[in-house]
Amino acid sequence: MMFAGKEPEPSFSATSGLHGTTLVVRVSGELDHYHTRLLRAELGRAWELLQSPTLILDLSALTFCDSSGIGELLQARHQGQLAGVRLILTGVQGNLARRLNLAGLTQVFEVFPSVADALEAA
């Protein structure tokens, strides 16, 4: 049973780790209006730790993304542009791939199939 104003149980996580000198933020679960603040917080830590010109956002374990989640991804892209950091999305599939395509955003983001592919390109 859901009560007004109460957030659902967490079904989202975002964690960061280094692959060589490149920081990878792994996102899993549902990125919706309840969870965008968690991604924003993790990306905030990532921007502070970043020591390379590339940040990879691994979305391969993302099961759902709504418009607020896409807004958060666009904000991250903008922040990267301001900082001179290349933001790469990997593992874009399913719901998110359809939404990015419908919104015409597939040309806005740099996308690679996997983290390994993105690391090779970085």
Image (spheres, grey):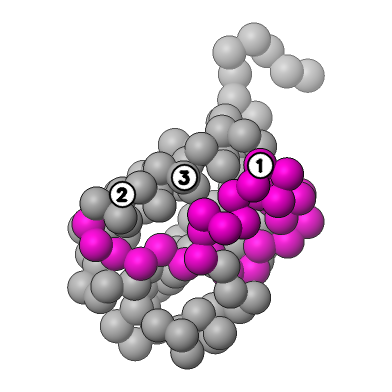
Which residue is rendered at x = 21% and y = 73% of the image? 51
Q: Residues within 10 Å of mark 1 (few under 14, many from 20)?
A: few
**44 horizontally vs 56: left or right:** left
Mark 1 and mark 3 in contact (Cβ < 8 Å)? no
Viewer-closest of 41 and 117? 117
* Residue named by callout 1: 103
Question: Dividing the image into 4 quarters, which one contains the N terminus?
Answer: top right
CA–CA distance between discs 1 and 2? 20 Å
Residue 45 appears in the picture as rendered: no
Q: Which one is in front, 87 or 61?
A: 87
Spot occupied by residue 77 in the image (x, y as percentages of width and height):
40, 52
Q: Residues within 10 Å of mark 3 (few under 14, many from 20)?
A: some
For image coordinates 56% across by 84% down, the residue present is 117
Q: Is residue 100 magenta?
A: yes
Against 93, residue 13 (above or below) is above
Q: Is residue 116 magenta?
A: no
Instruction: Report the magenta residues as a range.
Output: 83-110
